[in-house]
Structure formats: C-alpha cells, structure tokens
Amino acid sequence: NRISIGTQSLDPKFLKIMDRIHSLEETHSLLDYCRSGEWNFSLDFLLGIPHSHTGKRDIVKELEELLKYKPKHLSLYILNARTKYPLVDHIPDDEYIRKEYLLVSDYLRAKGFHHYE
C-alpha cells in the first residue's frame, strides 16, 4: 500500500558520484506527482556516500527539501560497499558515518519521524 522511491540524495553531485541513472529533475517530477495525488509514499535516503565528507554534503539541506514533499515514511540506509566497489576508498570512515547518522536521526525526530527498527 506504499510506493517506495529510491531518492538516495537530492544533490546532483552525489547522484553522479554514485552513478545513478535518474536525474534530480526526474526525482522532483516524481515527488511532485506523488504529493499531488495523495499517494502513500516512502523515500529511501542514503548515508555514507563516497566523497560526502570531502564534497561537503549538506545532508540537512537535502532532508529539508525531501520533507517539503510530505512523505509518510523515510528509510535511511548506510552504504555498504564490497571491496570491489570502485569508490570503496572514498567512503567516509565509521566516525563520520556515525555523526551523519546521529545528525539525520535528531533532525528527523524533531520533524516528527520516529525510529521503529
């Protein structure tokens, strides 16, 4: 009863780094459509993206933009890359990912989203 949309990031720089085939424009178009149709939709959002530390990812800005679409649910995932992943050496360290996760968690909790698993 819910559509899950793999947005991953709302920063075109990071979509390109991750070699995603969808564009930011396509993402916004789909989110506009879902919001206008009273759809029950969920957004998937990715943490620990390669170069997110050195590329100065503004994860809160991305989340602010996502929440404008009023999703009913958000799923957060931490990138889990295998050793043969081409960008494995550019994934942030565990401490950076921990801080990113806590920042996102606190932000979403303040916006009315609560963990359930």
Image (cartoon, grey):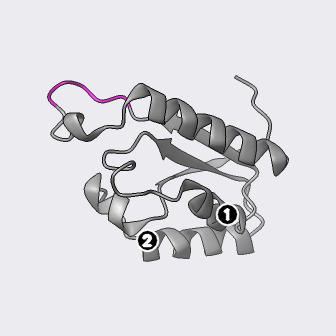
Give the x, y percent position of residue 63: 63, 58
In the displayed structure, does residue 87 sit left or right of residue 44?
left
Q: Position of residue 42 (x, y in %)?
A: 65, 49
Return the x and y of residue 28 as percentages of the image width and height: 54, 73
Quarter location, residue 91: top left
The residue stretch that appears in magenta: 80-84
Residue 45, label in figure: none
- The residue pinned by badge 1 equals 64
N-term-proximal mark, 1 vs 2: 2
Instruction: Tell me the residue at 36%/37% (across/down).
Output: 92
Task: Give the SS element for disc 1.
Answer: helix
Tell me the amino acid under the disc marked 1.
Answer: Glu
User: Foreground residue, 82 or 95?
Assistant: 95
In which quadrant will I find the N terminus? top right
Give the residue pinned by disc 2.
24
Observer-nearest residue: 94 or 66?
94
Q: Residue placed at 57% from the left, 61% from the top?
A: 62
